[in-house]
Image (spheres, rainbow, N blue to C red):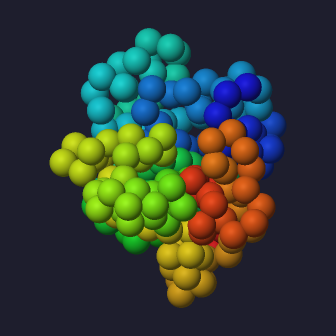
Amino acid sequence: MGRPEHEAMLGWIDDGASVLDLGCGDGELLRLLVRDRHVRAQGVELSEQAVQSCVAAGLSVFQEDIDTGLAEFGDESFDFVVLNQTFQQVRKPDFVLAEALRVGKRVIVGFPNFCYMADRLQIFFRGKVPVTASLPFEWYDTPNLHFLSVADFRDYCRKRSIKIECSVFFSGNTRVRFLPNLFGEVGLFLLSK
């Protein structure tokens, strides 16, 4: 099927649900959801080239900067809002997540865990910012603006009274069940208000 976080999201998203994918990129997840879950899909993406690619594939995607908000969408207008590999790249994550929770009944957030063991080892032994499969960019060329861990995100949700309904963690294609803040390369959370 592909990426393990996509498989997890397929398990969380109901057939026929309405889904808004914020920072949808080339539309890989949207195409999968339309094909396998028959969702009513909408995407938002900043990159003009990615938007054109999505539209050429028959997806409903428009270009916008989600840091400016989601004013065009009403409260709870989607069953699910997805922020997969987007949350750490926005300038105002607190505002963007609040908007996602307003617009969606449930929100899925996925991000690279910056406290992943391999990253820690690279920093410790090499003395350099890590470059890994989940963080494939050099420090000067990364789209990531916020460097958070699984523990940071859990604390953030607790402080904001955001309910974590479910979470899963992966290292490569393997699901991590023990000490995810250390062994999880990617964290994926299903949230609600």
Residue occupying image coordinates x 37% and y 26%: 51
Choose between 94 and 59: the one closer to the eye.
94
Q: Is residue 84 above or below residue 54?
A: below
- Residue that protrudes farthest toward the top in the picture: 56
Which x, y percent locates residue 28?
A: 55, 27
Residue 17 placement, left or right of 52: right
Image quadrant where residue 7 sits: top right
Which x, y percent locates residue 2?
A: 67, 28
Total marks shown come to: 0
Report whether residue 135 is seen.
yes
Residue occupying image coordinates x 58% and y 53%: 186
Residue 179 placement, left or right of 123: right
Residue occupying image coordinates x 62% and y 58%: 184
- Residue that protrudes farthest toward the bottom in the picture: 159
Residue 29 placement, left or right of 22: right
Image quadrant where residue 88 sits: bottom left
- Residue that protrudes farthest toward the left in the picture: 140
Which x, y percent locates residue 18?
A: 66, 42
Q: Quadrant of the N terminus?
A: top right
Which x, y percent locates residue 66?
A: 35, 51
Q: Quadrant of the C terminus?
A: bottom right
Residue 151 placement, left or right of 71: right
Report whether residue 145 is seen.
no
Choose between 66 and 103: the one closer to the eye.
66
Residue occupying image coordinates x 29% and y 62%: 127
